Image (cartoon, grey):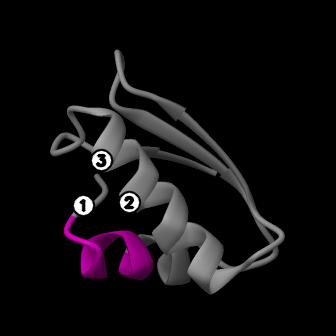
Amino acid sequence: MEFNIPAMSCGHCAGAITKAVKALDPAAQVNVDLASKKVVVQTAQDRQAVAAALAQAGYPAQ
């Protein structure tokens, strides 16, 4: 699943986003593209759960 994260602007943001997803699913694969502000997540969790974890970390997805 792919998310657009407009608030993501640096390596710290990418780390926080990865940490938030991994807290939800430690086996998740997280690929962050800072330039396009996109995050691709491979997980068994549903999209709403991942979006909620991102929002809770301060990075609401669009």
Whether label 1 touches label 3, CB < 8 Å: yes
Separation of marks 3 and 2 at Cα, in angstroms: 5 Å
- Determine the secondary structure under disc 2: helix
- Indicate whether 61 appears above or below 21: above
Q: Residues within 10 Å of mark 2 (few under 14, many from 20)?
A: some
Drawn side of residue 56 relative to residue 24, left or right:
left
How far from the left and from the top, in percent, is residue 48?
49, 79
Is the stretch drawn in magenta largely helix, strand or loop? helix
Using the image, tell me which numbered label, if any, was put on residue 13.
3
Judging depth in this view, the residue of 53 and 3 nearest the camera is 53
Membership of 55 in magenta stretch: yes
The residue indicated by pointer 2 is 16
Part of the protein shown in magenta: 52-58
According to the image, label 1 marks what residue? 59
* Residue type, mark 3 in image: Cys
Cβ–Cβ under 8 Å for marks 3 and 2? yes
Check if mark 2's residue and mark 1's residue have beta carbons within 8 Å.
yes
Residue drawn at x 44%, y 51% as measured from the top left: 15
